[in-house]
Image (cartoon, helix red, strand yellow):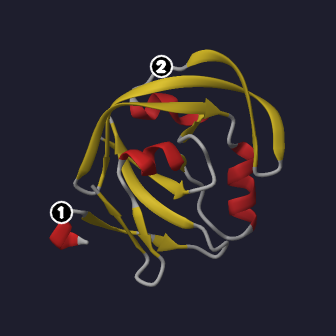
Amino acid sequence: MEEKNFIRVPLQKVNSNHFKIKAKINGVSGDFILDTGASNSCLGLHIVEKFKLLAHASEVKASGAGATGMDTFTSVATKVSIGAWTAKNMEFVVFDMTHVNEALTTAGIASVDGIIGAEMLKKARAVIDYGRNCVYLK
C-alpha cells in the first residue's frame, strides 16, 4: 500500500475489540474510535472547545451505541490530520457521547473525544489491515 502512496497509520486495538486512533483537529490531538459502521464522524459535545470549534444546532437526531433520539449539532473543522494524511473543512456531528464513554470506561478503556466514521474513511480511501492493526489513507 505504501508503494501506492498510501500513508500507514497505526491502530490500537482495545479490550472491546474496537480500534482507537489518534487524530488532530485544528492542530489539537485527540483520541478517537475508528468505526466503519458510523455513517458520520462525531465529536463529543463536551470536547468541542478543546478543538477550537463552534457547534451549530441541527434538526437531525442521532442514534447508535444503545441510545436513540439524541439532539445533535454540527461543526466544521478547518483541518483534520490522521498521521500524515490531512483534509480541510471536514464536518462533524456533535452530540453527548457520555453513554459511549461510560461503556468504554466499564470495559476498562479510556474515554475518547469522538468517532472517525465512514464518510471520512471514504474520503481518505481507507484500507484497514486488521492483521497488522493499521489503516492506510490516501
Q: Hey, what amino acid is under mark 1?
A: Asn
Question: Residue 34 in the image: x percent, y percent?
Answer: 52, 58
Q: Looking at the image, can residue 45 be seen?
A: no
Residue position for label 2: 54
Q: On the image, which quarter does residue 11 sit in?
A: bottom left
Q: On the image, which quarter does residue 17 sit in?
A: bottom right
Question: Residue 10 in the image: x percent, y percent?
Answer: 36, 70
Give the total of numbered labels. 2
Q: Residue at x 54, y 57 (%)?
A: 33
Question: Residue 32 in the image: x percent, y percent?
Answer: 50, 53
Query: Considering only vertical position in the picture, is 10 above or below 29?
Result: below
Give the mark toward the camera: 1 or 2.
1
Point out the tag, 1 or 2, that comes first from the N-terminus.
1
Is residue 110 left or right of 26 when viewed as pictured?
right
Q: Residue at x 28, y 57 (%)?
A: 83
Q: Distance between the residues labelled 1 and 2?
A: 34 Å
Q: Hey, what amino acid is under mark 2?
A: Leu
Residue at the far front: name it. 4
Assess disc 2: are there few (<14), some (14-19) or many (≥20) residues with their C-alpha within 10 Å of its C-alpha: few
Question: Residue 137 in the image: x percent, y percent?
Answer: 31, 58
Residue position for label 1: 5
Is residue 7 left or right of 129 when viewed as pictured?
left
Q: On the image, which quarter does residue 44 sit in?
A: top right
Q: Which mark is residue 60?
A: none
Comparing 116 with 109, the one in front is: 116
Q: Which residue is drawn at 43% across and 25% down?
A: 76
Q: Residue at x 68, y 52 (%)?
A: 101
Q: Looking at the image, can residue 65 be seen?
A: yes
Query: Considering only vertical position in the picture, is 126 above or below 118?
Result: below
- Quarter of the C terminus within the rendering: bottom left
Comparing 25 with 4, the one in front is: 4
Residue at the far bottom: name it. 131
